[in-house]
Structures are given as structure tokens and as C-alpha cells.
Amino acid sequence: MAELPTGTVTFLFTDIEGSTRLLQELGDRYVLVQDEHAAIVRQATAEAGGVQVSTEGDSFFLVFPNPAGAVRAAVAAQRGLATHDWSPGPRVRVRMGLHTGEGVRGGDNYVGIDVNRAARIAAAAHGGQVILSDATRGLVERSLPDGASLRDLGEHRLKDIAHPEHLHDLVIEGLPADFPPPRTLDARPNNLPLQLTSFVGREEPIAEIRELLGRTRLLTLTGAGGTGKSRLALQVATEILTEYRDGSFFVDLSPVTDPALVPSAIAQALGVPEVAGRPILEAVKTHLHDQELLLVVDNFEQVAAAGSVVEELLTAAPKLKALVTSRVVLSLRGEQEYAVPPLEPPDPERLPDILTLGRFEAVRLFTERAVEVRPGFRVTEENARAVAEITARLDGLPLAIELAATRTKVLTPEQILPRLQKRFSILSSRVRTLPERQRTLRGAIAWSYDLLDDVERRLFARLSVFIGGWTLEAAEAVCDPEGIGLDALEGLTSLLDKSLVRRDEPADGHHPRFFMLETIREFAQEQLQGGGDLDLVLRRHSEHFLALAVEAEPHLTADDQVEWLDRCDQEHANIRAALRWAIEAGAADRALESAGALWRFWQQRGHLAEGRGWFEEILAMPSGQGRSPARAKALTGAAGIAWWRQDRGSAGAFYGEALAIARELGDPARIAEALYNDAFVVAGDDLESATRMLEESLDLFRGVGDERGVAQVLTMLVMQDAQAGRWTSVIDSLEEVTAIWRRVGDRLHLAFDLVWLAFAHGRGGHRAEARSAALEALELFREVDNLTGIGIVFTDLAFLANWEGRHQDAIRLAGASESLRRRVGGPPGAIGGLLEGDPVAEASAHLAEDEAKRAWQEGLAMSVDEAMALARSEPGA
């Protein structure tokens, strides 16, 4: 074998497309076809100065000292394959991918991210296609072979690659060039998280799992913590993504401890909003009913009592499949278990040669992770035995191997081994009751823990209080590193270096978050519980996130509402834990105030049922029965949740008690707000009484100088004018109100009042002004994905379309609004003459019956984007 080049090299991967189908079709003749294909690829490689690194089945891994040679080889190979006579069988089509990067050798092969990137680029290509990375494109675009050119394919997400890769198609004159989009993660709907490290080995388990998924609909990957269940499930889901028409979705249950919240977690992963008055599980069933989709549910063991949720979904959705990871079997109907094996380590007693050693999966993983922290690392004759013994001593457990490999940054394998063995001997004498594999993993974690100094250990333990991750700022506030003599950034950096903490790169440019793998977090929690910091850290954690909830409240309707809604979503698991601590600690006022601050988050992000549950529990706390401002605030939030769940009775009761408390407290601002809120419910039955309440509220708001309160009441006071048809008066009042909202930066109230203003302009005959106001409201709601608001605007525009004479469009828009109402619930109802009436009935009077029915079905079938496009279209377009 020729010497493998190092330094900057260009990797070329090739693979026959549909090789399994060809094998079945050709039978014994496939061996001859494979040999003919191999001869063409090898000749092109040799003539261009390349080296064959390895072959596996019908795929080649090739390397070239210069990128121009790699491109020449790819062009020559594709031309040779295209002109070869493959009769009597079908033409052999080969996919190819090239990437230029650092050639880091590991035994008789290469290791490192650049190899993985090249392999993933090749996997994205179609048969007969050659795809180049942007790095290769930059080096060859001025020296392409005759008859070759490049076509920009844009950015694409590749399996196991953290950031999108800019890809280019190598167009070869005379050969097919019209290929479908690359076979990347963008090819099907999905939310599969990008992995920051390469996936090593597991070819046999992946093949077995794929085969099992072909004949079962519920497959549970089982194994102790650290065996790589989650990563294996994600890898399988990524590899078979294109086999599912509606994609693959990942549900992370690690931050969920309450089985009742499992349906909400699944709904959130799928993007299924909560429907008012309907269990969220029913909404998920409806969403999945006709979908051909793979659902990956991770870390099920801690909420195993919710296993019936998976059963119900599989029953309701006949084309759905579920891939679950759990430390225990769920014992569900139709469940197939697959016990995830460890990686195969070598036998140190029968040590193979260096080339063979490098093929063991456990050694490959150790080498790749070592290269990440020490780029020059290689398995050599000197360290081979130590590497083999380390991986064997760690039973091939991926997490344990990764932890050990990070130590190569400062230690050689020969130095790592005795330290690891010492830690295991101590552990074995202390925890003999644990299974061997669990002792091995705990030993690896404990060894990394032992390498920390005392203050780093305290920080590590304290960080385990977070659920679902944390920011640097949160670590500083909750863990008080300065109080134990440690800089937070330095402490986190040390824990990152030792792989006890991981960093999550945000895709939206926000501050990075940090997290622990669940197995490591469990170990850290044991240290926290065994020390004297537990109560202090739990209290600080709760105080920090309850304070965050209160801080978020004014932002949830303001110009920066998207940022704060996203932030609350990110910290939702921590907020849940903080509320739970407050309840168990009897801190009623903190719980009441925080829940009252969070209701707009729960409402806008589709957590209505969860919000109701929190309010029921918190309002029932014995220590929270006092007639306090905090209780009034929580009652107001509970009423808001009930209102959006279309439960007017509960909303009225909550608002009524809040008003009574406000009057007892004698605070004019609180009384004004309570009167305004209560008037919403009263207006449905007694508009005159509601008007009197609003007038009293208006006087109080003006007395305390609350401009926002004044604007809210002025909006409600237009009801009498609207019912009387005094549209000029309604318009004047609403324009005054929207001017206030623009001035104070309240986008949520601005959007809702623009809806009413649009309706009033339409009733008043001002078509252009009506359309302008409605479309502005539509954009405001779309910015924050407020589907309830979007549905209200569609109804608004349906009225307007009727008044413009566009009766079929009116019915389509009403149908789109009804579709959203069925998905996410609708407004609690028309209020005092605003949006009253039936645009469908009005439009149908101008159409034939079949025209009206067809338009209604078209509207119901529209996606949000299609309905948005119709809404934005000009009359007559």
C-alpha cells in the first residue's frame, strides 16, 4: 500500500447507488459488475496521483495530495462508468463526494472531522453525481478539467456536522446533470439535533435496528447509561430520514420528570399547538393520523408510567413508528426490545498489529476523541497496548471511552492507564452491589471527577441542579462560584475540558448554553446530595428562575416578545423545577407571583393545560389563601388561561375573586385592572354592566397615570358604538388606542386592536384602510407564530373579502381560519359588535352551492403559508 499523504489533502468517497437492489437483480453476476466498477475507479485514481485508503463493500475511500487531482479522478471515473457497457444489466450509477482538509492519520486510516465531512458530502449525492465542499471549490474552480464546471447548491445540513455546509455540483459535459436536491437533513421535515462530534462505528447495530424497524412499529433501545443509546437512535433516524414521507422528530424527555407532561413534550417537538378545551394528546393524535413519520423518544425510563401515550399514538396513527431509548423495557403492546451492545474493544492479551487494532470500534472512538483535543495524536507501537487496555477496561462503553480520551490533552495513554486502574480498584471496593457495566461507567466519571480540585468539584455538583441546561449567567447566579473561590468561566472551561460538561451551540446567535449528559448529571447530583450545599443551591435555583419569570412578564407583549418567549421556552424545565420547589417549600407568595407573571407565556406558546394545572395547585396552597396582591395576580393569570380555554365560568370566578381582593386592598391601579378584566366576561351577558365597570376602570387608570390601562379600556368601550353601528366613533377611538400601543411598544395589544380597527374600517366602507390594518396585524402575529391571532385576522379578512365582492376568497379565508381554530382553538368569541356575523353565510348567498362547498374545502386544506399568501393578495389578483 502506498504511503498515505498528510497535511492538507483532498478526500474522495464513492459508493454505488442502489447496490442492494442491483445485487438482488443480478445475483451471482453482481461480483463481476462490482469488479468492473472497481477497476474503473482504481484506474482513474492512479492516473490522477491518488491513493486508495480503504474499501468497504462497493464503496471507496480515496485520498489525493492535491485537490485538482481529486477532481480529475472523479471526472474520469464518472466518464468511464458512463461509457462502460453494463449489459445485460442496468447501468451502474456511483455517487461521489470531495472535501479538502487536514489529513490526520490513525493507523492505516485517517481520523478527524474532515474525513466525516467528506463522507457525509458523498452520502448527500445521487448516483452519477459529484458534490464538492466549499473548501475544495475554492481551490479548484480556476483549474477544472475540460468540460467540467461548478453549480452552486447552497447551504445544507449534513449528518453529524455541526454547521451547514456550502455544497457545489460538479457538472460534467455529456453526462446527466439534472439531479434532485442533495440527500441532506433538509430533504424531509425534522428537528433532529445536529451533533458536534463524529459518529464512530456501530455499522452492525445500525443495520440490525434498521431491519427491526422494517417489521415493527415500536422499537425500544435499552441499556445502562453511557452505552450510547441516544446517539445511536439519532444516527439511525438521520440515516433513514428520507424513508419517511413526513420526516423524523426527536423528543427529549431528559428534562421531564412528570409523566403527565409527556404528551405536551411530544406536541412541542412536533409543533402541535394546544387546542382550547381539548386534551393535548388528542391534538397530537389528530396531527399524526395520516403521517408517515418516525418519532424518536429519548430517556423514557424516568417517565415510564407514560408508556401508554406511545401506545395510543401508534393506535391512532397507522403509519407512525416509534424509536424509544430507555434504561428499562416499557412492556408495551407490540414493543420490540433491542439491547444496545458496547463497542467492541480489543483483547490486550492477544494484541493485534497496529493496522488491525485501528479497526476496533472502541479504539477508533478513543482515537477520534483524542485527536479532537490533541490533533497530533496517533496510535503507535509504543502506546498501542495502553490504548487497548484502556478501551477494554472501560468495557467498550462509549461515554467512558470519551471521558478517558479527553485526558490525552495532558497525559499519554501509558500515563492514563494506571490512574484509571487505581480509581476502579477504589470504586469496586465501595459499590460491589452495582452491575459490572454500571461500575465501569461510574468509575470513568469518578476518575474525571477526581481530577478536579475541591472548588471545581463543588461547582460540578452545584451545576447538577439545572434541568435542560444553563447559561453562564445562570451558573454565576445559582452556583455562586465566586463564593467558593472560583471564576465561573474558568470553572466551566475546566469542566468542558474534562468532558463533564458540554456546550450547546445556539443556531440563533444567542448566548451558548451548557449541559450535562444525564448519566453524568446523576453522578453530580449524588455529590450534591452528599455534601452540605443541596438546600442552598435549590433555593438559589428557584429564586433565580422565579425572578426570571417576573422579569419576563412585561416583555411577553412588548417589542422584544419573541426573544423573551424563546428564553422562557429554553428555561421551561428550570422554571417548572423552581415552581415545584416553591410549592414544596411552602413559599406561596413566590409561587403565586411567578405563576401570575407566566400566564402570557403559557398562553402564547400553547401550554394552556399545563398553566391551568400549575394555577390549580398553587391557588390551593394553604399558605396562599391570604387576600394578598400575589394571590390577586395569580387569580388574574388563572382567569386569563381559563378565558383562552373558552371556560367563561372559571374565568369569571377567578376575575371576580381578584376584583374583590383588589377592592379590599384599596389599590386604585389593581382595582382598575381587575374591573377591566372582569368586564370581558360580563360583556358576554350584560353589556351595560360591563360598560359601567369599564368607565370606573378608566377613571382609576387615568387617576394613576397608567397609559396602557387607559388604552385597554378605551378599546373595550367601543363595544356600545359598534353594536349601534356608529363606526366613525369606533374608528376614532381605536386609532387613538393603536397610537398609544405604538408609542409604548406593546405589539400584542397593537395587533389585536388593529384587527378591530380593520373590521370597523370595513364596516365604515374604508376598504383600503381596512386591508392595511388587517395585514399589519397579520404580520405582527406571524412574527411570533401566534396562530390564534393569525386565525382571527383570517376571519377579519373574510369579512373584508365579502365587502370587496370576492366571495370565494371570503369562504377560503374563513375555512383557513376554521382549520386553525380546530388546531389551536379560537378567540373566545365576538365582543360587542366586533367580528360579529357569519362571513361564510354572507358569501354563500352570492355563489352556487357547489362553488361555496369547494371554496370551503380549499380553505380548510390550506397551509398557514398558503392562506397567508391569499390574505396578502390584492383584490382582483
Image (cartoon, grey):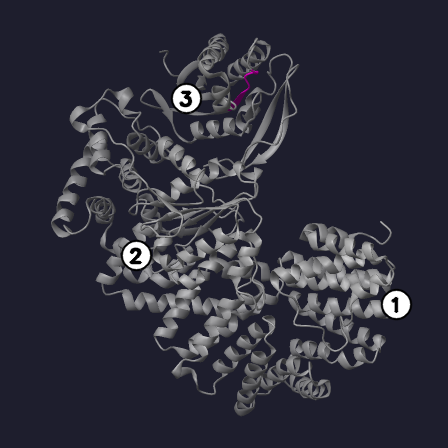
Q: Quadrant of the N terminus?
A: top left
Amino acid on which the number 3 mark rests in the picture: Gly
From the viewer's perspective, is 726 left or right of 548?
A: right
Q: Are marks 3 and 2 in contact (CB under 8 Å)?
A: no
On residue 765, which mark appears?
A: 1
For residue 560, say whether it is visible.
no
Alpha carbon of mark 3 to alpha carbon of mark 1: how far?
74 Å
Residue 632 at what x, y percent from top left? Answer: 52, 82
Amino acid on which the number 2 mark rests in the picture: Leu
Residue 545 at what x, y percent from top left? Answer: 43, 66
Is 854 in front, or is 496?
A: 854
Q: Quadrant of residue 659?
A: bottom right
Residue 164 at what x, y percent from top left? Answer: 53, 37
| Residue under numbered circle 2 | 459
Q: Quadrant of residue 50?
A: top left
Question: What is the secondary structure assignment of the residue under circle 1?
Answer: loop
Residue 426 at what x, y percent from top left? Answer: 13, 47
From the viewer's perspective, is 745 left or right of 397?
A: right
| Residue under numbered circle 3 | 7
